[in-house]
Image: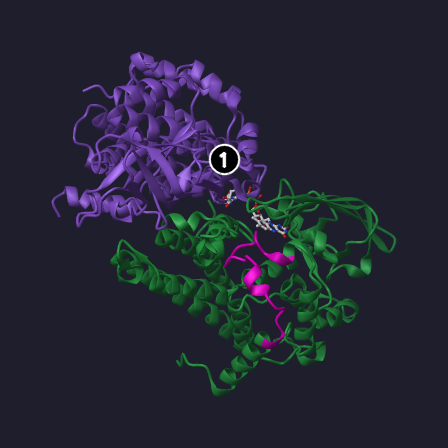
């Protein structure tokens, strides 16, 4: 074992760092209220910002959005460890630009899509000028995705889609949906579901906002009324979508903004160093010290798992179990960080961004609300525990 | 021993549940949360007519002659329903201060107006560091013959934006013992030099910054003895702490009830999610937390209400309830999944208040320290 970065990895890290500091949209990190692990305060889910688009395209030019993909598909030929280093730095600096298309859909298309599908979509994903939203959940199908009711009926060269999606984060600011729907209601879901790409501009799509508890319009309900999707947009075999979806969900669980945890923790450290309460610096208070030490330990464990998953991918091992572990750990940490941070800051911590007296820009107050989303989105903690117990440890289903 | 409520308290609880669900629906709660005042005069008037505002105060001042314990029963229900507005600041913080330390004249003219619902009052206590320690009180009141002049900044003052009068803790003498030299003044909120700014908070609970700049206060506005305000404040803080616990217990109960009902209805994997053991265990943990919090809160309230030494009980209640309500609200949210993460759902109203309640009157660490001291450690 060797827990150090290699010289090449260090050089790459420095290069990424320099790029971010030079190219990031000015003022973005200060303004954005993203909370580690959360899904409810992401600026990019709310508005489409030309400065962010430009930044994403610049990353695309370097092949960094898809850096661990094979070169023949426009990938950067980097290792997964390097990709992990890249995401860590990006999230540490609060830089925008990551997208469902490159993180989740792209890898799934590469694995299961036809050559035609790859030729059409992969180059655009690599360049970074596409935004996707996830069209999985429905009112009666959250954890139980097999219960989806939206239908995709084959009609000539098209699928005709009817039904409703919900919790569609950023659908209103995206180009295309990455969608699952039932092709055959009489077959079991894993034999009668299609996974496909639907263009937001197709007639028959209605997008309605849902405001989350942070006051952000991140969610949407999306209605499909006889929406025609070309069959060539279907990933792999028409009826095998549920199987591909499970793999896409594995990719999603591996999307962790690791660096943001460290960054917010550092904010807290600085606060504890600089703030006096009852005549004493907070960092001298044993309760504060104990809370910070506990957070530091949990962040360290999360980091180790994070690099472990990347290392496994580099060694052709798929981190199926580890993906659930890291999703579970980091999303719980999302709340612990917000909660412990608020406890350390005391009454001031409840002040909302914009308040004159709000410490750390009120980020922890937003984060406290947002941390509710982390443990629910992309598969709840309970579902992750089920996966760990059943897939991981071989325990029987109840 | 008698570990049940008496008949009148049971009645109060039942009628409060009915009244509030009708007169303070969640639609109103949301409107008030999102407004700048957080105050419904109409609801206030009705609560005064029911005798709630004067519940724990003597009849000769227009009150209902009840006890602190009676009030706790009511606050439990108010926490259950959520009732935005200045009830806590007017009744608990201000009413009890006047009752305990006010002159007869002050009680006649102010406490009776509180009881009748004519006057909204709050207590400006905490300052920039937001702690409840005597040391942090730096707002100064200088004696200028027949009046005092107040200068300083108070933070996290509840409902100051709508209060007619404020009780203000200020330093009248510097002393090596921070508990000495604090006095309480009754200040007209419209006095020149009083500046109130509403703070935007996670709890949306109308906490304010109040700046006093050369505010002239007549000598007769002193409440209690000069320089000896701290023991009064301590007594009020004990009552406020246990009262806040009662509200929090009610909120935790509501979170539990909502989540259990949802767990029975929501179907995933062809069965109610409440049939999954993971969810059942969450519910079991929640009910245990709610019952534990209620019992320790009621014990503390009874102790304080009886005039017995209650520091230990009150701090145990707040240390426990602060964390228990938070745990309950987090689990309830977990059971609701994505729907609970929406502004239109009720759960976040409770989740916010669980955090705000934790921060008010000292969090769990603060109160465990008091418990430890009471244990002789
Ligand atoms: C912020 C956020 C963003 C989201 N973005 C998107 C998006 O962009 N696109 C999209 O399609 N979806 C999105 N979702 C939806 C998300 O995938 C679902 O919320 C999630 O899968 C849970 O589904 P549900 O909310 O319907 O809860 P339910 O499935 O109804 O679950 C309710 C509770 O029951 C528990 N439960 C359910 N089944 C079991 C079981 N078998 N064992 C034990 N416990 C169980 C759950 O863990 C949870 O505690 C988002 C959600 C959030 C919160």
Residue B86 image position (x, y, % from top left): 43, 29
Q: What is the span of residues highlighted in magenta in the rendered image?
A: A22-44
Residue B376 image position (x, y, % from top left): 11, 44
| Label 1 near ligand 1 (CB < 8 Å) | yes
Q: How many labels sit on residues? A: 1
Direction from residue A213 to residue B372 in the image, left or right:
left
Q: Colour of chain B?
A: purple
Residue A86 image position (x, y, % from top left): 55, 74
Q: Colour of chain A?
A: green
Regarding residue B45, the answer to whether it shows in the image is yes
Q: Is residue A200 above or below residue B350?
A: below
Q: Residue at x 17, y 27 (%)?
A: B308
Q: Residue at x 47, y 22 (%)?
A: B44
View extreme (left): residue: B376
Report the magenta stretch's main SS: loop
Pointer 1 chain: B
């Amino acid at each position: 074992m060797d827990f150090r970065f290699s010289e090449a990895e260090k050089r790459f890290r420095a290069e990424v760092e320099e790029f971010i500091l030079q190219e990031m949209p000015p003022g973005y990190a200060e303004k954005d209220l993203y909370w580690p692990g959360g899904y409810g305060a992401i600026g990019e889910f709310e508005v489409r910002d030309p400065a962010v688009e430009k930044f994403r395209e610049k990353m695309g030019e370097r092949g960094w959005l898809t850096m661990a993909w094979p070169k023949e598909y426009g990938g950067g030929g980097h290792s997964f460890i390097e990709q992990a280093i890249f995401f860590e730095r990006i999230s540490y600096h609060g830089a925008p630009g990551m997208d469902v298309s490159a993180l989740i859909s792209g890898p799934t298309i590469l694995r299961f899509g036809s050559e035609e599908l790859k030729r059409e979509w992969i180059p655009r994903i690599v360049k970074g000028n596409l935004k996707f939203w996830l069209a999985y959940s429905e009112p009666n199908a959250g954890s139980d995705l097999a219960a989806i009711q939206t239908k995709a009926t084959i009609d000539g060269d098209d699928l005709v889609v009817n039904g409703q999606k919900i919790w569609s984060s950023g659908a209103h600011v995206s180009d295309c949906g990455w969608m699952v729907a039932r092709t055959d209601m009489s077959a079991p879901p894993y034999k009668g579901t299609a996974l496909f790409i639907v263009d937001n501009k197709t007639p028959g799509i209605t997008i309605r906002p849902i405001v989350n508890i942070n006051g952000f319009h991140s969610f949407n309900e999306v209605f499909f009324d006889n929406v025609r999707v070309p069959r060539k947009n279907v990933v792999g075999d028409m009826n095998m979508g549920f199987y591909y979806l499970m793999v896409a969900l594995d990719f999603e669980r591996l999307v962790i903004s690791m660096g943001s945890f460290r960054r917010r923790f550092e904010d807290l450290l600085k606060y504890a160093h600089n703030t006096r309460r009852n005549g004493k610096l907070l960092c001298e208070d044993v309760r504060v010290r104990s809370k910070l030490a506990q957070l530091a330990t949990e962040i360290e464990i999360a980091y180790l798992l994070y690099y472990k998953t990347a290392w496994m991918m580099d060694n052709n091992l798929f981190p199926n179990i580890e993906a659930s572990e890291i999703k579970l750990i980091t999303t719980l940490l999302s709340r612990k960080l917000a909660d412990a941070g608020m406890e350390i800051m005391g009454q001031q911590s409840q002040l909302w961004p914009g308040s004159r007296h709000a410490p750390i820009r009120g980020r922890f107050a937003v984060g406290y609300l947002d941390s509710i989303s982390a443990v629910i989105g992309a598969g709840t903690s309970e579902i992750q525990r089920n996966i760990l117990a059943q897939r991981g440890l071989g325990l029987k289903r109840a | 021993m008698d570990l049940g409520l008496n008949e009148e308290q049971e009645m109060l609880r039942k009628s409060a549940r009915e009244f509030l669900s009708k007169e303070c629906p969640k639609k109103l709660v949301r409107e008030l949360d999102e407004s700048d005042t957080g105050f419904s005069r109409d609801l206030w008037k009705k609560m005064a007519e029911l005798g709630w505002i004067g519940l724990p105060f003597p009849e000769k001042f227009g009150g209902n002659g009840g006890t602190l314990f009676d009030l706790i029963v009511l606050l439990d229900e108010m926490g259950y329903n959520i009732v935005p507005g200045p009830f806590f600041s007017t009744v608990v913080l201000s009413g009890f201060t006047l009752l305990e330390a006010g002159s007869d004249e002050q009680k006649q003219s102010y406490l009776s107006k509180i009881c009748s619902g004519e006057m909204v009052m709050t207590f400006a206590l905490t300052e920039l560091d937001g702690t409840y320690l005597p040391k942090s009180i730096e707002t100064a009141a200088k004696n200028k013959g027949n009046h005092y002049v107040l200068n300083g900044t108070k933070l996290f003052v509840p409902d100051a934006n709508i209060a007619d009068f404020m009780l203000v803790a200020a330093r009248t003498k510097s002393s090596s013992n921070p508990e000495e030299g604090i006095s309480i003044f009754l200040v007209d909120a419209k006095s020149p030099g009083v500046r109130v700014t509403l703070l935007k908070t996670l709890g949306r609970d109308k906490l304010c910054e109040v700046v006093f700049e050369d505010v002239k206060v007549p000598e007769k506005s002193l409440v209690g003895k000069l320089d000896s305000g701290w023991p009064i404040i301590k007594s009020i803080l004990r009552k406020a702490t246990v009262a806040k616990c009662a509200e929090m217990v009610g909120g935790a109960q509501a979170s539990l009830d909502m989540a259990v009902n949802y767990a029975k209805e929501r179907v995933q994997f062809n069965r109610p999610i409440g049939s999954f053991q993971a969810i059942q265990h969450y519910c079991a943990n929640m009910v245990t937390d709610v019952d534990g919090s209620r019992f320790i809160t009621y014990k503390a309230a009874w102790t304080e209400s009886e005039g017995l030494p209650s520091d230990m009980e009150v701090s145990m209640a707040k240390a426990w309830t602060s964390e228990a309500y938070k745990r309950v609200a987090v689990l309830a949210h977990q059971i609701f999944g994505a729907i609970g993460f929406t502004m239109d759902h009720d759960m976040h109203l409770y989740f916010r208040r669980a955090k705000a309640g934790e921060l008010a009157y000292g969090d769990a660490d603060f109160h465990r320290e008091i418990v430890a001291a009471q244990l002789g450690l």
